[in-house]
Image (spheres, rainbow, N blue to C red):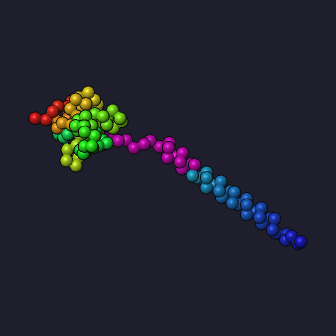
Amino acid sequence: MKIQKGTWLGLLTFCSLMTLAASLGLAVLFAGGAAAFASDPPQVQKSDAVAEQTFPGMITDSQCGARHDQSTGKRPADCARMCVRNGSKYILINGDQKNILEGNELALDHLAGQRVMVKGTLTGDTIKVNSVAAAE
């Protein structure tokens, strides 16, 4: 078997160059990532005072929504309370609008299944409940 002279030297040079290129690429990648984390994040202006609003609708639960299973024989209010005890959340439904209700659990439990007026602050699709009263 005959071995060519330039084979080992060429292979060694090729491997060395590939290792050097990979190391240089990783160094640039990590340096860029470190620079991105070191820079100050953009400042977001937030209003300290979020305006309280009044939201009309019906209190129900996130599992059943506006349509409770009638085969259980439970009233919508009882069904909503049962679903919340089993892990669902109270929601306010007004037409196609659905908002998760957070806070004031006793009042929500008392008025489940009824049309109400909820006063609170809206963040995303969640209303932080300050007060709730039966609609007139």
Residue at 42% across, 42% down: 41
Looking at the picture, tell me which residue is in the foreground, 28 or 102. Answer: 102
Residue at 31% across, 42% down: 63
**The C terminus is located in which quarter?**
top left
Residues shaded magenta: 30-55
**Image coordinates for residue 67, horizontal then vertical, percent:** 24, 45
Residue at 53% across, 48% down: 33
Asked whether residue 91 is drawn in magenta, I would say: no
- Residue 109, located in which quarter of the rendered image? top left
Looking at the picture, tell me which residue is in the foreground, 9 or 106. Answer: 106
Asked whether residue 51 is drawn in magenta, I would say: yes
- Residue 58, located in which quarter of the rendered image? top left
**The N terminus is located in which quarter?**
bottom right
**Which residue appears farthest toward the right when viewing the image?**
1
**Image coordinates for residue 76, horizontal then vertical, percent:** 23, 38
**Image coordinates for residue 102, horizontal then vertical, percent:** 29, 34
Task: Give left or right: position of 13 versus 111.
Answer: right
Answer yes or no: is residue 55 visible.
no
Answer yes or no: is residue 37 visible.
yes
